[in-house]
Image (cartoon, rainbow, N blue to C red):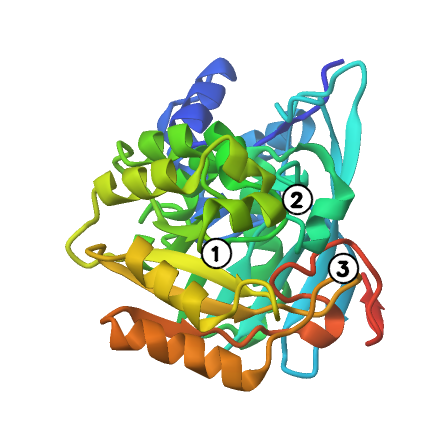
Amino acid sequence: MSPPVNLIGKSAAELRAFLELLGEPAYRGAQIYRALYAERRREFPSMTNLPAALRERLGREAAIMLPRVVRRHRSSDGTVRYVLALEPASPEGSGERGSHPVPAQIETVFMPEENRQTLCLSTQAGCAVDCRFCLTATLGLARNLTAGEIVGQALVALEDNRASLRPRTNIVLMGQGEPLLNYDAVMAALRILLDPHGMAISPRHTTLSTSGIIPAIERLALERVRPKLAVSLNASSNAQRDQIMPINRKYPLEKLMDVCRKYPLRTWERLTFEYVLLGGFNDSPEDARRVARLLSGLRAKVNLIPWNPGELPYQRPDAGWIEEFRAILAAKGISVFVRQSRGQDVLAACGQLALTESAAAAVPHA
C-alpha cells in the first residue's frame, strides 16, 4: 500500500486536485485548506464541516505530518529555540519517500514581543553557503526542506504558544539555510503563509534573507506574491567579503548592488541590508563610509548586528565602535538600526543555529 499523502504544504489547488482523485467535490479541498492553515487543525476528526465518511477516509489515505519537537531551549528573554525532527525525504527534498531517505533535524526560533511574535524559520537542513562567521555553516548541507516542512515549522511554533499569542505574527526566513537556493519550495511555502485564506501573514511582516544569489533575486522580483527582501552584506569591499562569504566570488558586490538597484520595491517597502559587525575586521569608520557609498541612492535600511559569540575565530565589536559605525551611516541619510539579538543564552541568535546544546536547560518534548 502507498504511504498516506501528507497534506501539509499543499496549496489550495493541489488539495482540490487530491479530493477530486478521491471522487469528492473539489470544494472539499478548499475546506481542508482553510482547516489546515487558517484554523490550524491537526486532526481530521476535528474538521466537522466535512462528512464523517470523508474524515474517516482521510484518516486512512492522508496525513497531517508536522515536524516533531525534539527539544525546546528557553531563553531568559522568552525566546524559544526548537530543535525539530523531520520525516525522511529524498535527497532532492521533494518530500516523496525515496530509496535513500534523508532524515534531518532543523531549528526554528519563536520570539515573543509586546504586541507580536516573530518566527525565524529554516529553509534547508544545514547550509552550503559557508559564511565563515556563522555556526550554521559548520553543519554543511543535509538537504533542502519541502514546502510542508517550512510551513510546518510555523504551525508547530504557533500551536506550542497558542495560549500566549499576540495579535500579529512576523515571519523571517533567516534560520538554517539559504532560502534562494531552495527557491521553489520556499515560494510554495510563502504562498500559503501569505495567503489571506491560508495563514494570512502580511507581506509587510515577512522577510526573506539571502546571501546574494543574483539569478534568484531577479526571479523573486517578478513574483506576484513575495516577502520583503533582506541582503546579507557584511563587508564593505570585495576583498573583505571574499574572506567571510565565499559566495561573493560568484556574485561580487558590484553585480549584487546592480541587481539591488533594479529590484522593484513596493510603495511601502525598503530593501534591508544586514551587516554583521565582526570586531576588528569590518567595523571601522572607513568600512562605514564604504557601506554608505555602496548604498547611496537606494531606498534601504541597514540592520547592524554585533557578532554573536560562538566557536569561531571572531569577536564581538566594541560598543563605541558600533555607535560610531551607526552614526556615520545615519549622517549620510541612511536609515540604520542596531539589532539586539534575542536568545543568545540558548544559542538562538543570528548565526548561532547549529543544533548545539545550550548552557540553559533544554526542555524535551512532552
- Whether residue 72 sits left or right of residue 93 in the image: it is right
Crowding near the residue tagged with mark 1, few <14, some 14–19, many ≥20 C-alpha atoms within 10 Å: some
| In the depicted structure, whether residue 354 falls above or below residue 127 | below
- Whether residue 302 sits left or right of residue 279 in the image: it is left
Numbered circle sitting on residue 66: 2
Crowding near the residue tagged with mark 3, few <14, some 14–19, many ≥20 C-alpha atoms within 10 Å: few
- Whether residue 361 sits left or right of residue 50 in the image: it is right
Residue furthest out toward the left: 267
User: What is the x, y in percent for residue 8?
Assistant: 56, 37
Query: Does the rendering let one see residue 195?
Result: yes
User: What is the x, y in percent for residue 199?
Assistant: 42, 51
Instruction: Answer with mark 1 or mark 2, whichever residue precedes in sequence.
Output: 2
Name the residue at 44% across, 37% down.
Answer: 252
Query: Does the rendering let one see residue 48?
Result: no
Q: Which residue is mark 3?
A: 312
Please state which amino acid type lies under the numbered disc 2: Leu
Identify the element where label 3 is drawn: loop
Tag nearer the camera, 2 or 3: 3
User: What is the x, y in percent for residue 71?
Assistant: 80, 60
Name the residue at 69% across, 53% down.
Answer: 107
Q: Which residue is mark 1?
A: 172
Q: Nearer the viewer, residue 224 or 134?
A: 134
User: What is the x, y in percent for residue 148?
Assistant: 57, 37
